[in-house]
Image: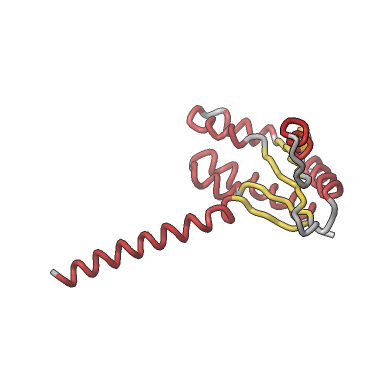
Amino acid sequence: MRMFLVFVLGFIVGAVGLGMALVSKASTVMVQEHRSASSIADTVARLKEVAEKDGWKFLGERKLHESIKQFAGIDVRPVHIVDLCQAAHAGKILAEDDARRVSVFMPCTIAVYEKTDGGTYVAATNASLLGRAFGGVVAEVMGGPVAEAQERFIQAAIAK
C-alpha cells in the first residue's frame, strides 16, 4: 500500500511539474518573436512587399503607440501592427460554420516593434500550432499554407 501511495504522489507531482513547465513555455510557443536587422519602417515595408508578391493583400498598418498616446496620454515605444489577408485561405475557413470562430484571428496580424535595447522585433501567432489546436479545415489552412507564408514574410522582413 505504501508503494502505491508513493507512486500516486510521484505521479501527481510529475503531472503538476509538467503542467507548470507547459504554462511557462506557452507564451514563447504560441507567439514567435524574431529580431529584425532593420528599422521598423524598413521591416514593415519588406513585410508588405513580400506578402503582396505572394498574393496576399496588405490591409493596413496601425501604430498602437500613437493610439495609446492619444487616448491614454502614455508614451510607449513604437508598436506597428501589420494586417495581411489571403482571401482564398480565409474563404476556405469561413465557408465552414464550425471553423468560423477562428475569424477572431483574421486577418493575419504581424507586430513590428521596438524594445528598450533599441532593436526592432517582429512577432506573430504560431499559425501552425493554432491550426493544430482547432483541427479540420483550420489545421489544413493555418497549419499549411498560412504558416509557410507567414514564415517566408517574416524571414524576408528581418533579413539584412
| Residue 23 placement (x, y as % from top left) | 48, 55
Q: Is residue 127 left or right of residue 113?
A: left
Q: Is residue 15 left or right of residue 25?
A: left
Residue at 64%, 48% in the rendered image: 147
Residue 118 in view, yes or no: yes
- Towards the viewer: 104 or 149: 104
Q: Is residue 120 left or right of residue 17?
A: right
In the image, residue 68 sits, relative to residue 38, either above or below, namely above
| Residue 5 placement (x, y as % from top left) | 20, 66
Q: Quadrant of residue 139?
A: top right
Q: Quadrant of residue 131?
A: top right
Q: Which residue is at the far left?
A: 1
Residue at 67%, 39% in the rendered image: 108
Q: Quadrant of residue 75?
A: top right
Residue at 60%, 46% in the rendered image: 127
| Residue 8 placement (x, y as % from top left) | 24, 64
Residue 61 in view, yes or no: no
